[in-house]
Image (cartoon, rainbow, N blue to C red):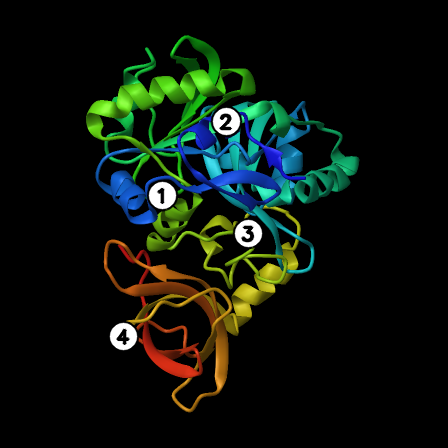
Amino acid sequence: MDKKTALYNKHVSLGAKMVPFAGFEMPVQYSGVTEEHFAVREKVGIFDVSHMGQFYVEGPEAKNLLQFITSNNVEKLTNGQAQYSCLPNGKGGIVDDLIVYKMNDEKYFVVVNASNIEKDWNHFSHYNEKFGAQLSNISDETSLIAIQGPKAVETLQKLTDTNLSEIPYYHFTVGTVAGVENVIISNTGYTGSGGFEIYFGNENAEKLWDELTKAGEEFGLIPCGLASRDTLRLEKGFCLYGNDIDDTTSPLEAGLGWITKFDKEFVDKEFLLKQKEEGVSRKLVGFEMQEKAIPRHDYLVVDAEGNEIGKVTSGTMSPLKKVGVGLAYVAKPYFKLDSEIFIQIRNKNIPAKVVKLPFV
């Protein structure tokens, strides 16, 4: 039985098309993917992302635990700063990608992917046997709304006294929104169009959704589903766990070397350092179709002779560029920019070109 977020009834009443996703009934679209996509790129869209998981890591050992199990350097965080990172799995792969929020020296807030809540919790708990931080899983009582797009700040600013322009990218504060106290107001999001994500208790979900919808009305705000979230993140070349990264892909293969810091001890450090020194034999790249075609997850990538050299992990028709774009792991030397590769679509090998990310 799939779980429902606190906004489930709201989505149904708005006529959203609901689908099972990561153990939840989630809205895949409302008015249509293209309309929702452009609303976020040009105006403002609102997303229910309450299926995501949230943990608190607290106490004198909180930082040490996070420093050891995540790939990025937690030491660098100041209070009120957030950090994109991943959890190496001890075998060269990735347990999950996540965001670490530093509340203070002994309190961190961690946001993980919906499909991995239990797996991540077990991973945290396993390593915590050595550290003894206080862990709490608040996923079930926490809601998360993302307000994304160029008009997101103006929309949210109507409902809070917190000066949003003073919160830099990947920073956050705790404030009051529409009369609801203790809301984590975070300048983050996975659309590449800017905006905020707000975390709060489930009991305030409908109220905040309605207030935000009203506040954004004059800017053309519309509700958006998972499908447009996917096309938005893909145009920016952002990885999706389960598609582009998983337990078999290393952060270095996935182009996440920038969140893998070797100036500290952490899970898989030796393995990844060796991989960095020797170079990877395959890499996640962005590619654009050279003919009219849409690449999809798991399509084969071949060379000019038809030899298999990789696999598509994510693909779509870019609403903005009107061309097929995708991410794929490809073997050396085909991950060089401008390499010619071919995507196997219905037994035809369609030409594509490796391009620099983001696509837009």
Left or right: where 112 falls relative to 300? right
Q: In the image, which disc is placed on residue 290?
A: 4
Q: Where residue 308 sits: x, y (%)? A: 50, 82
Cα separation between marks 1 and 2: 25 Å
Q: Position of residue 309 (x, y in %)?
A: 48, 80
Disc 1: which residue: 191
Label 3: element kind: loop
Q: Earlier in the sequence, mark 1 or mark 4?
A: 1
Q: Can you give x and y, in whole percent of width and height, for residue 16 in the image?
A: 42, 37
Q: In this rendered view, identify the residue nearer to me: 58 or 53.
A: 53
Q: Which quadrant: the C terminus?
A: bottom left
Kindly indicate whether the residue at mark 3 contacts the one at mark 2 (C-beta within 8 angstroms).
no
**Dot placed on the residue nearer the N-terminal end, 4 or 3:** 3
Looking at numbered disc 1 in the image, what kind of residue is underneath it? Thr
Q: Nearer the viewer, residue 10 or 146?
A: 10
Quadrant of the drawing holding the N terminus: top right
Residue 122 percent location from the top left of the image: 73, 41
Label pair 4/3, CB-CB below 8 angstroms: no
Q: Which residue is mark 2?
A: 9
Which residue is depicted at the point 61% across and 39% down? 67
Q: Earlier in the sequence, mark 2 or mark 4?
A: 2
Residue that extends furthest to the right in the rendered view of this protein? 129
Dividing the picture into quadrants, the one containing residue 159 is top left
